Image: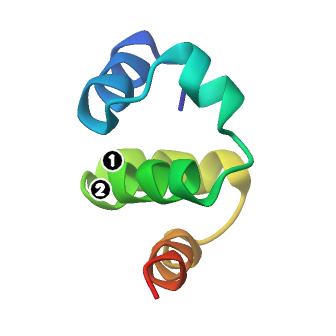
Amino acid sequence: MLADDARAQRLLDLTGLTPDGLRDGITETQTHRAILDFLCQHEPDLIGAAEALEIAPEQLVAAARELHR
């Protein structure tokens, strides 16, 4: 996801994260929630991330739902 400069910038713009904030908060639930929400809002990003992780897109959607409980 971050290998593509345009996608990485869109992630930062839409989530309000900064590169430092992303690095510092990578283990935080709030950061996970922001990233998963970002992915779920744009299907090409969701599919691309799922392919890179070698999982089904539905697993990312399920993870996002779980974090919002």
Which residue is pictured at 29% across the width and 56% down the height? 43
Residue 8 spot, x, y in % from top left: 43, 21
Q: Is residue 34 above or below residue 17?
A: below
Q: Is residue 28 above or below residue 15?
A: below
Q: Which residue in the structure is indicated by mark 1?
A: 44
Q: Are marks 2 and 1 in contact (CB under 8 Å)?
A: yes
Q: Position of residue 30 (x, y in %)?
A: 52, 55
| Gap between marks 2 and 1 measured at Cα | 4 Å
- Going by the numbered disc 2, the residue's amino acid type is Glu
- Residue 56 locus on image (x, y percent): 59, 72
Task: Describe residue 61's horizontal placement relative to residue 55 as left or right.
Answer: left
Amino acid identity at mark 1: Pro
For the point 33% across and 38% down, which residue is it?
Answer: 15
Is there any visible trace of residue 47 in the rendered image?
no
The residue that mark 2 highlights is: 43
Figure coloring: rainbow
Whether residue 58 is visible: yes
